[in-house]
Amino acid sequence: MEKRQKAPIGRPRGFDADAALEQAMRVFWEQGYEGASLTDLTNAMGITRTSMYAAFGNKEELFRKALERYTEGPASYGARALREPTARQVATAFLNGSVRATTRPSCPTGCLGVQGSLAAGDPGRGARDALVTWRNEHTALLRDRFQRAVDEGDLPPGTDPGLLARHLMTVANGIAVQAAGGITRDELQQVADMTLQSWPPATNPAQLP
């Protein structure tokens, strides 16, 4: 007798999970965690709730995946800035990137990492905690980079790298909030430029790249 073929295990999703996650990211970016209903999310993603749960988990898990996508996409300027050769260039690339990312014509204004769950109540506690961790991790990366700059003589010996990183992150977060409020890119760029005017001078600029 001819052997019967086994049916494939599981069913194909029938949708582009990457494109669906992109749309979910935009909904969270524009509406925040609590403001984004499951109906908003599934409509934008073009899938059913059952498919969403199967592919991405619950709403909080979907939010965390959307935040990862945001970090690797619109917010990737932060990782690129850390690779700049001097602390001033790091700060310049970081703030300029923040201005551009929060005012893109084809994207929601502001920053998902700042506004995503600022007003979240108890149901959104997990998302809020995820964003607090996200912001703290990025501040720590800047702190470590500025500590290296102090060690290399790129920043004055008395510079507090943690305070400098927190200052830069606070300005970037403020830029995001202002962008969400309708402030233009040109105005926000002026804010970034003003911040950079007071940047600590390099101790041994001749030795730097």
Image (cartoon, rainbow, N blue to C red):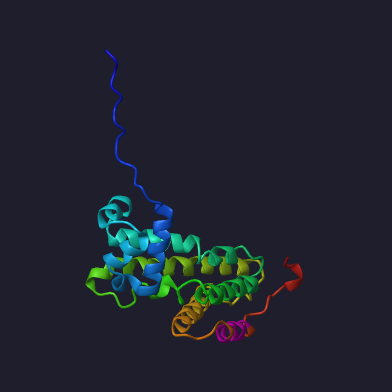
Count of numbered marks: 0
- Magenta: predominant secondary structure element? helix
- Closest to the observer, 123 or 139: 123
- Closest to the observer, 83 or 145: 83
Residue 189, magenta (yes or no): yes
Magenta stretch in the rendered image: 187-196
Residue 206, magenta (yes or no): no
Percent x, y of residue 144 = 53, 65
96 relative to 127, above or below: below
Q: Residue at x 28, y 50 (%)?
A: 54
Quadrant showing the C terminus: bottom right
Quadrant showing the N terminus: top left
Q: Residue at x 30, y 74 (%)?
A: 35
Q: Residue at x 29, y 15 (%)?
A: 2
Percent x, y of residue 99 = 55, 77
Lateral position of residue 199 relative to residue 141, left or right: right
- Closest to the observer, 86 or 206: 86
51 relative to 32, above or below: above
The quarter of the picture where residue 193 lies is bottom right
Percent x, y of residue 163 = 50, 77
The extreme front residue here reads: 2
Percent x, y of residue 141 = 51, 65
The extreme right residue here reads: 206
Q: Residue at x 28, y 62 (%)?
A: 59
The extreme left residue here reads: 122
